[in-house]
Image (cartoon, grey):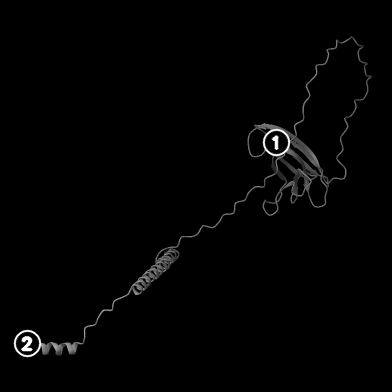
Amino acid sequence: MYRRRRNVEDELRARVGPRPRIPRLGCEQALLYALLGVLLLALGWGFAQVCGGFSQRVVDGAVQLAGLIPWPGEQPTPTPTGIVVWTPEVFPTYTPTSTPTSEPTTAPTLTPSPSAPPPTRPPGPSPTPAVTPSPVGYDYVVESQTQQQVPGQGVCAAQITGRVLDANGQPVVGIQVEARWGPGPEDRAIVPRPGIDAPFSGVFEFCLSPGSFDITVIDGDRRSQSAHVEVPRLDGQVVVCEVNFRRTY
């Protein structure tokens, strides 16, 4: 009985084969395997970081693309277009130089002495007042010019208006009026402005700051007399000036 069991065990051991023995690792091999494991962990962590950043960028790109492409049945929001706003031309501000005023001196009082009566002019024809002739050589002359100060506070320190009439008193069209405050090409304002305002219909208006201005008519090569306007700096008041031109031909 015992021999038969042993024979069976020997037969089974022969069929299965010898039991594998686990090799024992030395210190150097264990240290090498540990370093290899740490290296594999570091590579896995780096790969996870790269894949995570790439996947985040993919998700962000998909979200942006989904925001740009409208869903079926959704109306796209129109993009507002820019509106061009015209900025009015700003003229340079002229600051007048203050002139020192001298203190008034008291003049001595004179006692009038009796004087002889003035001589009596003999009777005769009364003198005729002299008529100031129009400037010679100008195609446009200044017919009248008035200036006054009115209470007010606004953007303009001076409002210069006027008309340009022909010899028959009819408005002159198709010309321009210039207000100049310096010798440079930019030291002026012209009405109407080409391409912006309506054609000239005989009436002009300027909105200016304090300073010294010369108002003239521009009509090709024809000459125009200049109207000089002084606009002082006043607080709470606006200078209103009216200049009228007349064509001599």
Task: Left or right? Give the position of 115 relative to 155.
Answer: right
Q: CA distance from mark 1 to mark 2?
A: 142 Å
Q: Nearer the viewer, mark 1 or mark 2?
A: 2
The amino acid pointed to by label 2 is: Tyr
Judge from the rendering whether residue 18 lies leftward or rightward of residue 135; answer left or right: left
Q: Report x, y in % for residue 63.
A: 42, 64
Seen in the picture, residue 3 relative to 229 is either above or below; the reply is below
Tell me if 85 is positioned left or right of 133 in this view.
left
Residue 28, percent from left and from top: 36, 73
The residue nearer to you, when weighing 212 against 125, is: 212
Vertical position of residue 78 compared to residue 104: above or below: below
Disc 2 designates what residue?
Answer: 2
Q: Position of residue 195 (x, y in %)?
A: 68, 54
Image quarter (top left, top right, bottom left or bottom right) of the N terminus: bottom left
Q: Residues within 10 Å of mark 2 (few under 14, many from 20)?
A: few
Q: Which is more toward the observer, 172 or 110?
A: 110
The residue pinned by badge 1 equals: 240
At which x and y percent is residue 92? 70, 43
Q: Secondary structure at mark 1?
A: strand
Q: Which structural element holds mark 2?
A: helix
Q: Amino acid at mark 1?
A: Val
Give the label on residue 98, or none. none
Dot 1: within a 10 Å radius of its alpha carbon, few (fewer than 14), some, or many (20 or more) residues? some
Q: Is residue 133 above or below residue 201?
A: above
Quarter of the image where one finds residue 53: bottom left
Q: Residue at x 35, y 75 (%)?
A: 29
